[in-house]
Image (cartoon, grey):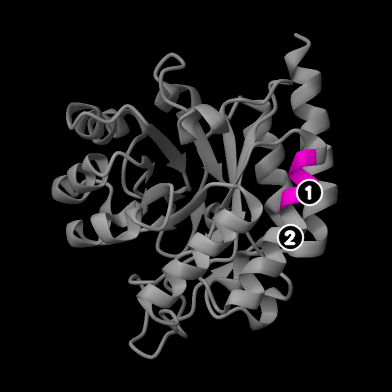
Amino acid sequence: MTTLEYLKSSATGNFFLLAGPCVIESEDMALDIAAHIVPLCQDLNIPYAFKGSYRKANRSRVDSFTGIGDEKALKILQKVGREFGVPVVTDIHEAAEAEMAAEYVDILQIPAFLCRQTDLLVAAAHTGKMVNIKKGQFLAPESMRFAVQKVLDSGNSQVAVTERGTTFGYGDLVVDYRGVPVMQQGGEVPVILDVTHSLQQPNTGSGVTGGRPELIETIARAGIAVGADGLFIETHRDPSVAKSDGANMLRLDLLEGLLRRLTDIRMTINKF
C-alpha cells in the first residue's frame, strides 16, 4: 500500500490527518506529541501522518529559530515513524534536499511560496515519495493543476494539494472554500485543508507572524463540510513557548475534542 492509499483508506470514509509541531524542537517533544495523537486517531479511524519540519527556511528575521540541525531532526522524524508505525511528512525547500529528506520520511511537502518551482517539484516527484503541494497564497485554486501536473509528468501519481489561505490585504489570509472541489479535479487529487496556517496573520511589524487560533474549529468545520479529504493541523503542548508559529497552533490537549466533533460532522455528511 502506498502512503497515499493509506491516507485514503479509512473504512468509515473519515478524513485523514497530518498533524504535529511546526518544527522539530527535540526528540522528546516529537515522541510525546506522536504518542498523544496516534491512539486518538486509531480510536476515531483517522489515517494519520506525523508532521514536523526538519528546518524552517522561510523566516521573517535572521535571528528566528530554524532548527536543531538537519540530520538530527530528520533522524527524529524517522524514529517517530518507526516507533509508531505512521508515515511522516516534512518540508523541503530546494531540489537538492529532496533525495536527502526522502531517506527519512514518507511525504515531501512543498511550501506554499515554492509551489511553482519546477525543479523542486520534479526532484520531489523523482524520489517516489508522496508529494504534498501547498497552494501559494498568491494563486487561484485553478492554477494548482499545473503544479500537480508537473509531479504526474515526472512519473509520480502520489500527489496531494493543500489549501492554506489566500493573501487578503497586507497582513491577513482568507480561505475560499470553493477551491476545495476545484483542486480535487473531480476526485482525482486529494485536497487537504491546512487549518492552522490559514489563520496566520503574516508580516507583522515585529517580524513575528501572528494568528487567530480561536478560529481553528470554525475553519476546520467548514473544511470538513465542503468535503476536504484531509486536515493539516500544527499542534504543541504549549504554543506560547513554541519556537515557530506558536501564534496559530492548536494546544495539544484540545485536539481530541476537536477531532471527535469533526468526525461526527463527516459521518453525518456521509449519510447523504
Measuring 69% from the left and 64% from the top, which residue is drawn there? 33
Q: Residue furthest top?
A: 272
Q: Is residue 192 left or right of residue 267?
A: left
Check the picture and name the quadrant holding the C terminus: top right
- Which amino acid, mark 2? Ala
Q: Is residue 233 visible?
A: no
Measuring 47% from the left and 28% from the top, which residue is drawn there? 190
The answer to the question of whether label 2 and label 1 lie on touching residues, with beta carbons closer than 8 A, is yes
Quarter residue 64 falls in = bottom left
Q: Residue furthest bottom?
A: 63
* Mark 1 nearby-residue class (10 Å; few <14, some 14–19, many ≥20): few
Q: Position of residue 134 (x, y in %)?
A: 39, 46
- Which amino acid, mark 1? Pro
255 over 176 or under it: above or below: below
Q: Position of residue 2 (x, y in %)?
A: 45, 31
82 over 55 or under it: above or below: above
Q: Position of residue 133 (x, y in %)?
A: 36, 43
